Image (cartoon, rainbow, N blue to C red):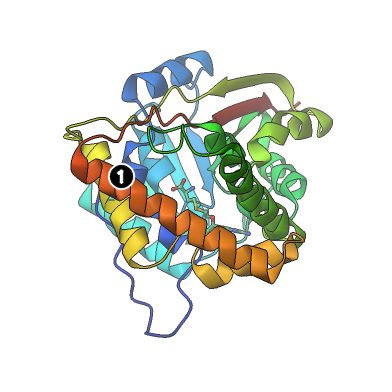
């Protein structure tokens, strides 16, 4: 898969999540793990699927590979550009006859009650102000006995992972980096733009909303970095790091990060210090990759939470 081509005009805001649809997304899943999930969650009888907040279809593609060949997949996204892009990509992949993409809002899905056997989303609940309302809406369009499946991370967990660069950082610097992420995540949530670690809370939300037979799994995928960095995902990660550093980017761009940090209760001066520290860490990591000394196990927490509608 290649990075989606943007047809946005210069100076217009890019569509939601544009920064995240880079080549790293192609390395999110182990194919045999997805087959195991399909078996455990029993996709055999599934004939209609809705992928909510489908973006350019990364999750739709992954699912298409493990669903029965007769299953039809519909993707829905708020952004016209992603709907067009996903439509082009399934045509290029030769699976257009199984897939359709439409524009719509996760909070008010353009489908009748009880339409789908399986309603799913991947990294979408982290972007909505009220994830419980979004799950409720997914339940509405799922047929009785059908399944709701949410794939959502706890991004704070990734902050606890050490690399050969950060494992000897002073305690205060490690703690400050944690604080930087946490204050930004809380600020984003305060602004109603979603909580980047919501995966931890999804099982409880589904239970509260009355989904039954809850199953909670975690992706088994790690993306370790070690010399000589010759695996495709390692090269993609090294490119992303260099690209972020060149553009003075860190998870989000500087203005967005500042907005989240201040909304989370952080101070303007503290923000500049932490932003500089994050840039410095990237510099050290790039230098270590270039010297062939960088390594990191790169674990992530990505939950798969599934429940059946009564
Ligand atoms: C991080 S991307 C995930 C895309 C895709 N699920 C994947 O895993 O590659 C989040 C997606 O959710 C979409 N989105 C965010 N809020 C939405 C909403 N309220 N309704 C529909 N789509 C939404 C964005 O446009 C974006 O495509």
Could one spot residue 59 in this view of the protein? yes
Q: Nearer the viewer, residue 299 or 144?
A: 299
Could one spot residue 96 in this view of the protein? no
Could you tell me residue 175's position as x and y percent?
63, 41
**Does mark 1 have its CB less than 8 Å from ligand 1?**
no
Could you tell me residue 94's position as x and y percent?
22, 46
* Residue 127 in the image: above or below residue 162: below
| Residue sitting at x 32%, y 42% | 26
Q: State which quadrant residue 268 falls in.
A: bottom right
* Residue 195 in the image: above or below residue 252: above
228 vs 256, left or right, is left
Q: Nearer the viewer, residue 242 or 221?
A: 242
Q: State which quadrant residue 289 falls in.
A: top left
1 vs 164, left or right, is left
Q: How many marks?
A: 1
* Residue 262 in the image: above or below residue 30: below
Is label 1 in a helix, a strand or a loop?
Answer: helix
Residue tagged 1: 237
Could you tell me residue 303's position as x and y percent?
57, 29
| Residue sitting at x 43%, y 58% | 279
212 vs 230, left or right, is right
| Residue sitting at x 49%, y 66% | 253
14 vs 172, left or right, is left
Q: Nearer the viewer, residue 18 or 136?
A: 18
């Amino acid at each position: 898969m290649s990075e989606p081509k943007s047809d946005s005009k210069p100076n217009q805001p890019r569509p939601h999540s544009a920064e995240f649809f880079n080549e790293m997304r192609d390395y999110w899943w182990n194919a045999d793990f997805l087959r195991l999930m399909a078996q455990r969650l029993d996709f055999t009888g599934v004939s209609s699927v809705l992928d909510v907040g489908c973006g350019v279809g990364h999750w739709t593609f992954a699912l298409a590979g493990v669903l029965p060949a007769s299953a039809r997949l519909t993707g829905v996204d708020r952004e016209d550009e992603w709907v067009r892009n996903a439509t082009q990509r399934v045509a290029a992949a030769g699976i257009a006859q199984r897939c359709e993409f439409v524009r719509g809002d996760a909070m008010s899905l353009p489908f009748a009650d009880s339409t789908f056997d399986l309603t799913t989303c991947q990294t979408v609940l982290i972007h909505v102000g009220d994830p419980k309302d979004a799950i409720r809406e997914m339940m509405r369009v799922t047929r009785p006995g059908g399944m709701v499946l949410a794939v959502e991370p706890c991004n704070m967990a990734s902050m606890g992972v050490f690399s050969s660069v950060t494992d000897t950082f002073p305690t205060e610097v490690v703690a400050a980096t944690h604080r930087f992420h946490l204050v930004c995540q809380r600020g984003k949530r305060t602004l109603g733009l979603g909580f980047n670690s919501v995966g931890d809370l999804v099982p409880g939300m589904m239970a509260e909303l009355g989904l039954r037979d809850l199953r909670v799994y975690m992706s088994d995928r790690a993306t370790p970095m070690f010399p000589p960095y010759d695996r495709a995902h390692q090269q993609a990660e090294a490119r992303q790091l260099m690209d972020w550093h060149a553009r003075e980017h860190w998870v989000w761009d500087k203005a967005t990060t500042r907005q989240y940090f201040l909304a989370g209760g952080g101070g303007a001066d503290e923000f500049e210090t932490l932003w500089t520290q994050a840039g410095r860490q990237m510099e050290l990591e790039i230098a270590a990759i270039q010297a062939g000394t960088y390594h990191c196990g790169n674990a992530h927490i990505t939950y798969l939470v599934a429940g059946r509608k009564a």
